[in-house]
Amino acid sequence: MKKLALATALLVTPGLASAQTLTGTLKKIKETGTITLGHRESSVPFSYIDDKAKVIGYAMDICMKIVDAVKTELKMDKLEVKLVPVTSATRIPLIANGTVDLECGSTTNNVERQKQVAYTNTHFLTASAFVSKKANNLKKIDDLKGKTVVSTAGTTNIKQVVEANAARNLGMTVLPAKDHAEAFLLVELDRAAAFVMDDILLASLVASARDPSLYQLSDEAFSLPEPYGIMLRKDDAPFKALADKATSAFYRSAEGAQTYAKWFQSPIPPKGLNLNVPMNEKIKKIFSNPTDSPDPAAY
Amino acid sequence: MFSGFDFDVIWRSLPYLFWDGMSFTLMLTALSALGGLVLGTLLALMRLSNMRVLGAIATGYVNLMRSLPLVLVIFWFYFLVPYLGQMITGSERPLVVGAFSSALITFTLFEAAYFSEIMRAGIQSIPKGQVSAGYALGLTYRQVTGYIVLPQALRNMLPVILTQTIVLFQDTSLVYVLSITDFLGAASKVAQRDGRLIEMYLFAALVYFLISFAASRLVRALQAKTAIIR
Amino acid sequence: MTYNWNWGIFWEMSPEATGTYLDMLLMGLRWTIATALLAWVVALFFGSIVGVMRTLPGRTVSIIASAYVEFFRNIPLLVQLFLWYFVLPELLPKTAGMWLKQLPNAPFWTGAIGVGLYMSARIAEQLRAGIKSLPRGQAMAGTALGLTTVQTYRYVLLPMAFRIIMPPLTSEALNTVKNTSVALTIGLMELTARARAMQEFSFQVFEAFTAATILYLLLNAVVVFGMRRLEKSIAVPGYIAGK
């Protein structure tokens, strides 16, 4: 409420005429002097909370590049960055209802979601796989027949596993978990036989588990590698254009590759773990040739 | 897997649990109890007023809220409040509402239905003669309500109101479903991060128990005291 | 508003491919009903025992009973469900814990029994109040007739006490239905969880929640109607409820 009053006050202040020609998110940012970033709590290394309760990650770094671009574009000296934690299930409604301006995490970009939200350039590609305890010897999707399987609520992964369950007649019980950490915990506690998620997130969960040697990733994937994108509001062309420009300049620069290496090929907080995931051909392509396509076949 | 209890994990996370978590829980409880009581009293007055339409609106609202699970209401408001804010302020975009405000609005609106039932009973417990006497003295509706009816209704219902507040205190744990860091949220984050579920959940249960138990004892003592005065 | 309404969504196929989104919600409603019914049985069973124990003269018995009530009343339901679901199996011997975890429909059994135990404390308190509200002469008359304590409770006190507490029992029955939704936190796919899942799959937040709201209202109406019928059919002539 206070912010709104402030915004109206700014609006009638002479000398800030440019605010009136702006639209959508950019107008809001200019008026309120704040930009709200949605972040995740356990999407390592994209967006997560370290041991000092600080939000960090690869996607956060990219979002900060967009924030810088917004600041320059709007000629603002100060831009307050507000952080709002989101979950897989809340992120899309929170972008749509205006709570969050940019969602910086590990959100799959697909055609269906584009009915509600928009995405800027793809920052990663990952396929949907599952993790389970080595002792149970589960490698293929068909091995999950009749088992209890967990996935995170609100993800494309849970949808894919539900669809595969129906298509392959596997008779699995699919449990939705609130977040990745809870889902992995259910596997750790033997409440679920497997956790279906993007392979990169699974790899980082296993690496940071108390005993990584207990777990293995599946050989078979539920999907082609799918693109991750930073989410923003739909039908906001000027904001998207700005975000696209900022990210594509970032990916093409040396800093882009350095940032990738910082999160995927070096020790990261909180435990100094190194994920050791060098860029594959597809990821190299999105860095040299940034794109926001939702189609996995386009990569 | 969980060989041996690690009480150290509780000790280490105490500041986070209480400073971040419990303060959120207590703030939310206190503010939404207050807001719920005010709004609930208004609803009760609407239901008891002579204006049919107002009464019907209040009755409909109270019955709707009381028929829905709190979890569903939490989800409803979490997504709805920004749009409601937009409608109310006439802003051109949905209002930005933080986690705390969102939870506060939800619990205030939800608890108002329960508090309104309590206040309605309280108001109805005041002998009609007192109201008539007030009007005979030339007092207006506002004066009769504000000086005669509500103070007594509040005092008579204080133990019930406080008991409902203890229920509310326990219910705030449900913001867990929104990944908000209340006391339970903080405990479960530590539990999942350090793999210390047993310790953290038992500790959370113990803390909730001690606070609720002590509070309900106090309410009982208060009840005994007010009973003697009257 | 940046929201795309689509009320036709209910007739679209859900990703589970076993039916439409509407079917998905109705499946959730069925789980809600099943959970609430089992929870209600558990609540009545333990609530009656503990409620009676609290009115017995024995000191130990009544201390145990009030400890039971205080335990279940002063810990949030959500925390209680976590205790049963996450903590209990780890505290049991390994094989027993494993058996508990591998139980088919574990969230259902844990949820129903957890909600039932939570509600039982409230029913115990209602029943105690009901028994206490009976004139002392009734118990004395039972004893005078040579009935044992068990018989006095069975034939004299409980039938009357339960009739007296029918109205609060109705609202406790409604609370039981509503409380089953808390079990979504341990993975029970009941109505609220299904509405959530529908929202996540289809992104139609408000349609999904509206439908769930209507289904809860209908379910409430059925419970209230059923309890009223029961109340009428068991009413004792000569009492207010009996007319």
Image (cartoon, rainbow, N blue to C red):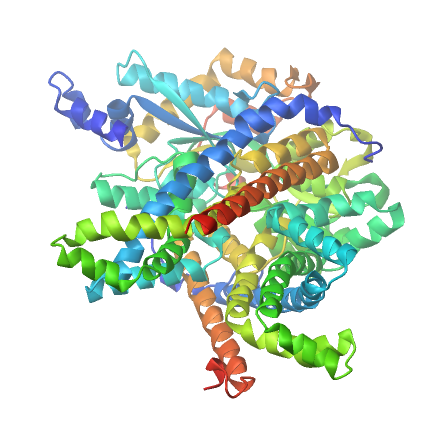
Q: Residue at x 61, y 40 (%)?
A: B208
Note whether A264 is above or below B201 in the view shown.
above
Residue B17: horizontal and vertical position, in percent? 59, 28
Residue situated in front as seen by the camera: A279 or C95: C95
Total labels: the figure holds 0
Position of A10 with respect to A115 (left or right) is left
Query: From this viewpoint, is residue C31 visible?
Result: no
| Image quadrant where one finds the N terminus of chain A | top left
**In this rendering, position of residue A249 left or right of residue C67:** left
The residue most toward the bottom is C237
Residue B63 appears in the picture as rendered:
yes
Residue occupying image coordinates x 54% and y 81%: C230
Quarter of image, res C172? bottom right
Say whether residue B2 is left or right of residue A46.
right
x and y percent of residue A276 in the render? 69, 21
Q: Give the vertical position of C57 relative to B183 (above or below).
A: below
Q: Is residue B147 left or right of residue C6?
A: left
Q: Quadrant of residue C65?
A: bottom right
Q: x%, y% of residue B70?
A: 48, 53
Residue A46 in percent (x, y) is at 56, 27
- Eyeballing the image, is A71 above or below A35? above
